[in-house]
Amino acid sequence: MADRARPEPPLTLRAAAAAAAAGCILAGASAVTVAVLAGPGPGFTGYVSEAGITGSDHAPTYRVGVYALAAGLLLLAAALPPVLRVAAALLAAGGLGTALSGAVTCSTGCPLPPFERATVADLVHGGASIAATAAVVLAMVAVTLARDAGARLRRLSALAAAVALPLCAAVGLAMLLVGRGTLVGVLERVVLAIAVLWGVAAATTVGLVDRR
């Protein structure tokens, strides 16, 4: 006698938050990418944030993407199990920092010290962006160190952190020693890509585990 098909388990709030997080992160990253590629920016020699400066035709698309990324990080924080409260707090901080970076736009060129004169808005935007990225990378580390996080999620986070941490250090040194240019531009994009990929993969993993 053929086995009866087992009904699908109900979608829990945590799984729903994880699914929404993955969707928001993907949609946000896509919108930001479109704004960066379609805009008249300096290419890899500039910062990603230059796509969102006031007056740019693609600034609205960029901001929508940034806010979607912020929502995705907050949803991922809500989707994590209680044993990952440190990682959840870091992701929530990253989401708020991302939202702030979208609300406060930088001036043309997004200048930052020590090689360029920056306005208050430039410093707020740059500080929020850097803090948000750092919070997400530290969340990877927090998941890696949490013994009860689950083997798959820990391995995923360990791999992402192992790649992101040295790259973040390289970005910081390049900004201090070289300044704005191709090196910083390329490294920044690689770090952001790793954060996006980890966010989507982590949300997917959390959602699948919670539905079992």
Image: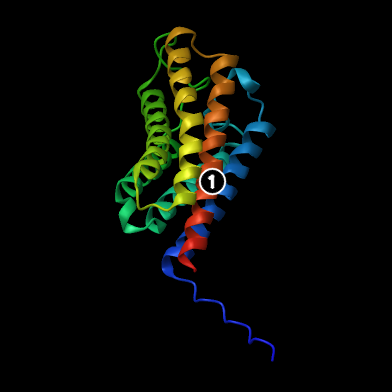
Residue 48 visible in the snapshot = no
Q: How many marks?
A: 1
The N terminus lies in which quarter of the figure? bottom right
Q: Farthest residue in the front direction?
A: 1
Relative to 206, does residue 197 appear above or below in the rendering?
Answer: above
Q: Farthest residue in the bottom direction?
A: 1
Front residue (pair 148, 97): 148
Instruction: Check disc 1 and give the amino acid type.
Output: Val
How are the colours assigned in the image? rainbow
Residue 113 horizontal/vertical position (percent) = 40, 13
Residue 134 visible in the snapshot = yes
Q: Residue at x 46, y 23 (%)?
A: 166
Identify the image quadrant of residue 104: top left
Q: Residue at x 45, y 61 (%)?
A: 17
Identify the image quadrant of residue 39: top right
Front residue (pair 63, 48): 48
Q: Residue at x 69, y 33 (%)?
A: 38
